Amino acid sequence: MMENFLKYFKLPLPQLLLLSVVFTQSKSLLAQDSVQQRDSAAFRQIYTQSLTDGRAYDWLKHLTQGIGHRLSGSPSAEKAVFWTRSVLDTLGFDSVWLQPVIVPHWVRGTAEKVAILPGKTVKSMNLHALALGGSVGTPPGGIQGQVVRVSSWEALDLLGEKGLKGKIAYFNRAMDQSKINTFEAYGGAVDQRVRGASKAARYGAIAVIVRSVGTTLDTFPHTGVLHYDTAFTAIPAIAISTRDAEMLNELLNRPEPVRVSINLHCESLPDAPSHNVIASLRGTEQPNDVILVGGHLDSWDVGQGAHDDGAGVVQSMEVLRLLHKMGYRPRHTIRCVLFMNEENGGRGGAKYAEESAKKGEFPLASIESDAGGFSPRSFGFDAEQSVFDAFFDQIKLAAPLFKPYGIVLEKGGGGADIGPLKGQKGLLGGLEPDSQRYFDLHHTGNDVFEQVNKRELQLGAAAMAALVYWMDQHLPCSKK
């Protein structure tokens, strides 16, 4: 047969072999072009559908305005659980269910009353303040004390018991405005909110005031979780608005001591039952390999939790709807998880990881949206060190497809709720929208539906759906 083939082409064997290699390579390139064209067309379909027939914005309106804020353990949080399940039940997915989880139940109680007390040169003034999440309340009638400014942990230690006993520690470190990445700036200031109370209590402070961790000067205080060290007394902790913080700084520059009264009614109740909300499109080839998209259903008890994290919730729901609407049948199982209790405990994420491991599932890839509903800019990726390079080398192949949509793929990402899955050696990723305004709204009464732009929200959902589609087509199965 080879002799007849040689006669037909009248070519020497070396040249014929070279021609065969070229022909094979050409077929491979044509196949790659065909796959690229298919993927490009799928991306275009996903984006068009999201921008012209999206549901996320309407869902967000009901979640925020119809239900409102959704702190773990609250009646509104459970209302959100059953409403999102009912919506997912109507969309034709393969399965929708609730995953029980026990969550903390902290209540704010009657609104805080925080005021500067009058002095010889200081006028009485109410402060815009919020108790930090998990704070203890004050005794009936509140507490009063002299305010001592603390600019760093080193300064706290220098003050010691002599400078802080019986007084109110005021942590005034602001976010670094020179940082382009506002999440980096947030990380440089939030530690005083999280750990300041116990560090000050160690030296006998009776309460803590924290400058709100935000990027703009306004009168909206930012709440957020604090963690008490059980080795020290739990003392009341509040955040004041950035504008009030600037005013307090000016007063503390004067020679007269500044005294503040604090009256809080918050308390921690017994843990309460709640749920993660889960929906799946079952994989046709490897159903135990899961590609997850998710956001957290709970929010703080001020505002409406629109950007944090109503946006991530409805975007994750929309990912499954968009893929199902286009008739897509995934190779791996694609799953939407609406986690409960990210804000003050992380128990929803921990419970999901625990149950996933018990079932023998492999979390092939998990994508979280918990950075607001602003214009999507990138996806950041992470994984256990031994598997990350192989994952990222594969993911980088999708970069040309995302370029027309203004999305880049980079190292460093993930999310709090999917973090417990890292040890199972799947890929973790996070949607990273434009972050410049996020910390104007984060954990404030101003995080409301009107702050979300419909087109930006739907672009984020489309980007997530496109990434999930690509990962399902190109990431290898676990071979479990």
Image (spheres, rainbow, N blue to C red):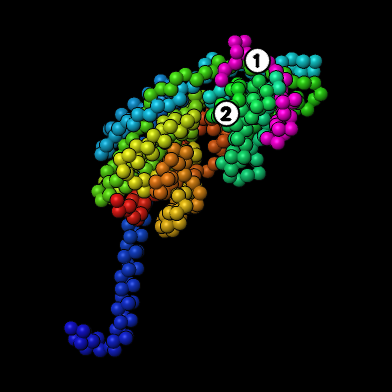
Quarter of the picture containing the N terminus is: bottom left
Provide the residue span drawn in magenta.
Answer: 136-164
Q: Is residue 157 magenta?
A: yes
Secondary structure, mark 1, is strand
The image quarter containing residue 68 is top left
Q: Percent x, y for residue 242?
A: 65, 29
Tell me the CA gap for discs 2 and 1. Answer: 21 Å
Q: Percent x, y for residue 43?
A: 37, 51
Residue 9 to residue 379: above or below: below
For marks 2 and 1, give the one nearer the viewer: 2
Looking at the rendered structure, the kind of residue marked 1 is Ile
Point 45% across, 49% down: residue: 383
Q: Residue furthest top?
A: 141
Point 27% across, 37% down: residue: 95
Point 32% across, 85% down: residue: 15
The image quarter containing residue 254 is top right
Looking at the rendered structure, the kind of residue marked 2 is Asp
Is residue 419 shown to the viewer in this render? yes
Residue 247 to residue 358: above or below: above
Report crowding for label 1: few under 14, some 14 to 19, many 20 or more residues within 10 A (C-alpha).
some
Q: Which residue is labeled 1 in the image?
A: 143
**For marks 2 and 1 on the same chain, the one whose residue lies earlier in the sequence:** 1
- Number of labelled discs? 2
Q: Percent x, y for residue 187?
A: 59, 39
Q: Is residue 140 magenta?
A: yes
Secondary structure, mark 2, is loop
- Front residue (pair 372, 266): 266
Q: Residue furthest right?
A: 255
Q: Which residue is labeled 2 in the image?
A: 229
Is residue 47 shown to the viewer in this render? no
Point 41% across, 22% down: residue: 272
